[in-house]
Image (spheres, helix red, strand yellow):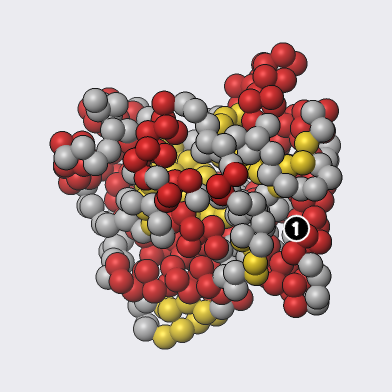
Amino acid sequence: MSRIDLEKAREAFEQSTDGTVGIEEEFAILDAKSLDLVPRFEELAAAAQKSDDQLAASISSELILSEIEIRSGAGADLTDALTRQREMRERLFALSDSEGVALGSTGTHPWADYREQLNVQSDHYRRVVDGLQYVARRNNTFSLHVHVGINGSDRAVRVCDRLRAVLPTLLALSANSVLFEGLDSGLASVRTQTFTKSFPRCGVPDSYGSWQVYREYLELLLATGSIEEDTQVWWSVRPHLAFGTVEVRICDAQSDARESDALTALIVACVLQAARDDDEGKPVFEPPPRLIEENLWRAIRWGAAGELIDLQSGVCTPARTAIAQLAEWTAPLRAELGIELQLPVANGAERQAAALAEGQSIADVYASTVELTRQTFGADEPTRATEGSKP
């Protein structure tokens, strides 16, 4: 039975407001001593319900019981959403401390065996696991999702179209998952290879051009029994049918709260700049999907330390240059909205790779990320992203 009301979804966009922001961050639930994944979500959720109704309403399960998501809810703008998220982070970390568990924030857990993980037994996740089998069970990954309100269903689809070529650059900046299954994967974002390149209807979407065309695509999926829910369409940028937002889903979870905030700010700026460009009738740059996929692979493999193809000139450029170009593209809009942008000199993948090159063990490298996460996500007054270094 279909659980998608496409007319209601269209209405959600017609009633949406530009520039509202929602943030979703996924954390690994860890044994405080061994840093192994532990299936403690239900205990954390129950403890939150007893002690903190607001926190209880802000946390959510994901595919496995060793994962917890914290959500800002709909902020009026970026500042409001970040304020909400910071408060919920601090409450979540205080709760985890009281329950004797730690929280990790990298795109993958470095050594967990997916065969030992327990899946959440909700109807939704049972459908996911039953439908995808090994592909779903192996997906023990953690990410950052950012929602930005966009008014108008046609406009939201066109904004997604404009962001397709930007996705590899955002991934390169966010890359934070080098370690997986007890190995140095040699990839900057092994999460993307495990999830994005394995799940159906995932990764860089087609260009649809209008709500009607996108709706016809969804109707075909429904009519053929390919999906039952809109959340079974896992594109790395998608119109979120329930919230009336453009949701960007390409990024690894960040170990440093300052970097998560800065990445969120850049994503919000990119979405709103794409909407501005659409409003002003600027030409849409739509490179062939195979070329965007080439850049996606480069971002998976080398992250911010590598090169991306400038798809307009056809030459390679440092990924850091491409990141700086996103900052330049969004600069006027950010100045107008007061969005400061301070991006890190080195991201999580670069720090992990450097530590491994120095001879640190996988366990020590991960322990340092967990400590960084505790200090920046859980502190009462962490140093904010706007105090970092420019790209």
| Image position of 115 with respect to 152: above or below | below
Which element is circle 1 on? helix
Residue at 78%, 60% in the rendered image:
363
Picture mark count: 1
Q: Residue 350 appears at what percent x and percent y?
A: 68, 70
Residue 272 placement, left or right of 354: left
* Residue 30 visible in the shown view: yes
Which residue was labeled with disc 1? 366
In the rendered view of the protein, which quadrant contains the C terminus? bottom right
* Residue 215 visible in the shown view: no
Residue at 82%, 51% in the rendered image:
371
| Image position of 137 with respect to 59: above or below | below
Residue at 41%, 39% in the rendered image:
129
In the rendered view of the protein, which quadrant contains the N terminus? top left
Q: Nearer the viewer, residue 121 or 259?
A: 121
Q: Nearer the viewer, residue 50 or 317?
A: 50
Residue found at the very far front of the displayed protein: 115
Residue at 83%, 28% in the rendered image:
98
Q: Residue 29 appears at what percent x and percent y?
A: 69, 40
Q: Nearer the viewer, residue 125 or 309?
A: 125
User: For mark 1, does the 10 Å Cα neighbourhood hold few (<14), some (14 to 19), or many (20 or more) residues?
Assistant: many
Q: Quadrant of residue 243?
A: top left
Q: Residue 194 appears at what percent x and percent y?
A: 48, 58
Residue 41 placement, left or right of 355: left
Q: Residue 318 appears at what percent x and percent y?
A: 55, 80
| Image position of 384 with respect to 245: above or below | below
Residue found at the very far top of the displayed protein: 50
**In the image, what residue type sits under mark 1?**
Tyr
Residue 118 placement, left or right of 85: left
